[in-house]
Image (cartoon, rainbow, N blue to C red):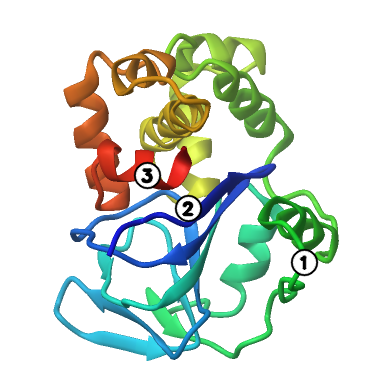
């Protein structure tokens, strides 16, 4: 089975809907919600423990693999988003948790995946998720993550580079450099979805070459760019 479903990007979030296929153990920056469309979903932790349920929440930087073979919807929320704050409250202590179904709005039968993402964002109480200076720095870095430097982003928001890194670690729960790789992968994935060859997708993401893109994608998604190409194109 291949990753040949639908993959879309939203504001601070992304979603996939379709069959689950081969993936290796990986960690990613986003908090992830796995929703089983058929039967139950299965997530395997690095220690071999299996979590089986209709809705499974995986916190950022937690090593895991998805072993389900049915249809799934995968929701990825970036650590600076309000959606992440909302989801994190559902399992404040556990790295991987089976949670109650229905914690996000169900997708209507005729509704597109990207419209579903917008509706989810609109259903959550709006509140500031992170410090305004960090939010400004992330917005700058997100525009061209392969070209913008952390030092430049720090200067733009009135912080030293070291202070910005400390603030990001405290409020995002991960190094700013790791968050930056995630955004580079997003740019590369968008290029793939627009039909660009993998070599050009690597350039779009600011990776040194296609092999660099492949290593980053396998580390954060457990799949190769070639596999991603199937669902993104």
Residue 3 in percent (x, y) is at 36, 56
Residue 1 figure quarter: bottom left
Rounded to the nearest whole Å, what is the CA distance between mark 1 and mark 2?
A: 27 Å
Q: Residue at x 72, y 57 (%)?
A: 112
Q: Which residue is mark 2?
A: 30
Q: Is residue 92 above or below residue 158?
A: below
Dot placed on the residue nearer the N-terminal end, 1 or 3: 1
Q: Judge left or right: residue 160 versus residue 226.
A: right
Residue at (31, 23) in percent of width and height = 198
Number of other residues with Cα within 10 Å of mark 3, as a class: few under 14, some 14 to 19, many 20 or more: some
x 61%, y 49%: residue: 13
The residue beneath circle 1 is 110
Tag 1: Cα neighbours inside 10 Å, few (<14), some, or many (≥20)?
few
Residue 89 placement, left or right of 185: right
* Percent coordinates x, y for residue 162 in the rendering: 43, 23
Residue closer to the observer: 225 or 233: 233
Identify the element where label 2 is drawn.
loop
**Which residue is depicted at the point 40% across and 33% down?**
185
Task: Tell me, yes or no, whether the two marked residues, 2 and 3, touch with CB atoms within 8 Å.
Answer: no
Label located before the other in sequence (1 or 2)? 2
């Amino acid at each position: 089975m291949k990753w040949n479903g639908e993959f879309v990007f939203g504001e601070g979030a992304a979603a996939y809907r379709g069959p689950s296929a081969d993936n290796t153990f990986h960690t990613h920056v986003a908090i992830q919600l796995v929703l089983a469309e058929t039967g139950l979903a299965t997530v395997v932790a690095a220690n071999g423990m299996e979590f089986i349920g209709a809705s499974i929440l995986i916190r950022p930087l937690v090593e895991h693999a998805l072993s389900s073979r049915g249809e799934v919807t995968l929701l990825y929320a970036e650590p600076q988003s309000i959606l992440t704050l909302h989801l994190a409250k559902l399992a404040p202590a556990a790295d991987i948790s089976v949670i109650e179904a229905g914690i996000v709005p169900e997708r209507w039968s005729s509704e597109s995946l990207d419209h579903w993402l917008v509706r989810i964002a609109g259903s959550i109480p709006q509140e500031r998720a992170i410090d305004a200076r960090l939010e400004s720095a992330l917005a700058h870095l997100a525009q061209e993550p392969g070209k913008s430097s952390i030092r430049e982003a720090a200067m733009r928001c009135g912080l030293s580079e070291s202070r910005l890194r400390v603030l990001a670690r405290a409020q995002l729960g991960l190094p700013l450099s790791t968050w930056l790789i995630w955004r580079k992968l997003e740019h590369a994935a968008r290029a793939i979805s627009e039909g660009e060859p993998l070599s050009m997708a690597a350039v779009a993401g600011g990776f040194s070459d296609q092999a660099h893109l492949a290593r980053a994608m396998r580390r954060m998604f457990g799949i190769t760019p070639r596999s991603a190409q199937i669902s993104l194109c």
